Image: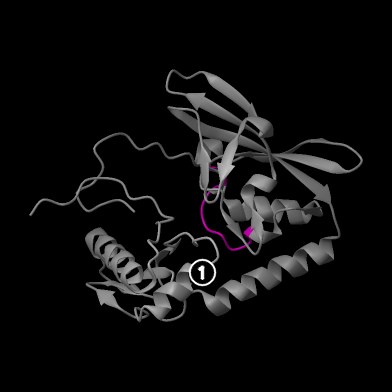
Amino acid sequence: LVRDGGFKGIMIKLSAGFNTIRLKDKNREKVYVSAQAGARLSRLIQFSLRQSLTGLEFAAGIPGSVGGAIAMNAGAYGGETKNAVHSLTLITLEGEPKYCDRSSLNFSYRKLELPSATIITEAVFELYYGNSCKIAYQIKKNLTERKKHQPLNLPSAGSVFKNPPGFYAAQLIEEAGLKGYQIGGAAISEKHANFIVNTGKATAADIENLILLVQEKVEKKKGIRLEPEIQIIGERERK
């Protein structure tokens, strides 16, 4: 979430020049697929399906890029990105490439601790031979579940809060009576309480204020402080 006052710095978007996906290596059991950080995660999943490779079905429907999925350790339906990552190529601010294998990567829930001042440019995924029909079925099942339970018809940044240990953030928000609550153009989804949707003209301030309100209300009612999953950057708009 970029605040309404903008971001004072340089934003680098890895897209057209960093979107190659290719087979890198294979053996009797595993196949290694290289994907550059700017490639869409959905393209990687479809590439894996065409090659009858299993290991990424859980990510079907997760928006964003390969690099973003790795940096946030995106996950769903019991799967996490970290489980499929074999190695990463990073680049420093000085332009020097840096190779990291899986054992040197510090993944945690919805997070990857990257070395200071580095950017992910490429990842190698460790996937397995599978049955294309079973893979396609699981992808379709996950997409159907998302459409059924998530407000995909309205703009959002996906899940707003991390699930606290032993709880679901959506359930805590709903039990706090906040489902449907609205500030400006930002509203807590009636379909899934861990989504804040833009009903038309939401500002970043509307969304951030709603996040703060949810944290306050849930902590007051349940004694649990929800931690945002989304990252908030930039400057607040000056009045």
Mark 1 residue crowding within 10 angstroms, few (<14) / some (14–19) / many (20+): few
Q: Position of residue 152 (x, y in %)?
A: 48, 72
Q: Mark 1 points at which residue?
A: 168
Q: What residue type is labelled 1?
A: Tyr
Rendered image coloring scheme: one colour
Which quarter of the figure has residue 19? Answer: top right
Which residue occupies 52% across, 68% down? Answer: 167
Q: Where is residue 86 in the image (x, y as percent from the top left)?
A: 70, 37
Which residue occupies 23% across, 46% down? Answer: 6
Query: In this image, 173 relative to 20: left or right?
Result: left
Residue 214 visible: yes
- Of all residues shown, which one is farthest toward the left? 239
Q: Quadrant of the C terminus?
A: bottom left
Q: Position of residue 227 (x, y in %)?
A: 40, 57
**Mark 1 secondary-structure assignment:** loop
Residues 133 and 190: in front is: 190
Query: In this image, 148 relative to 225: left or right?
Result: right
Which quarter of the figure has residue 199? Answer: bottom left
Q: Where is residue 185 in the image (x, y as percent from the top left)?
A: 26, 72
Which residue occupies 83% across, 61% down? Answer: 132
Which quarter of the figure has residue 207? Answer: bottom left
Residues 100 and 218: in front is: 218
- Of all residues shown, which one is farthest toward the front? 223
Residues 60 and 109: in front is: 109
Q: Quadrant of the N terminus?
A: bottom left
197 within the magenta span: no
Range drawn in magenta: 59-67
Which residue occupies 24% across, 63% down? Answer: 209
Vertical placement of residue 238 versus 16, above or below: below
Vertical placement of residue 208 versus 91, above or below: below
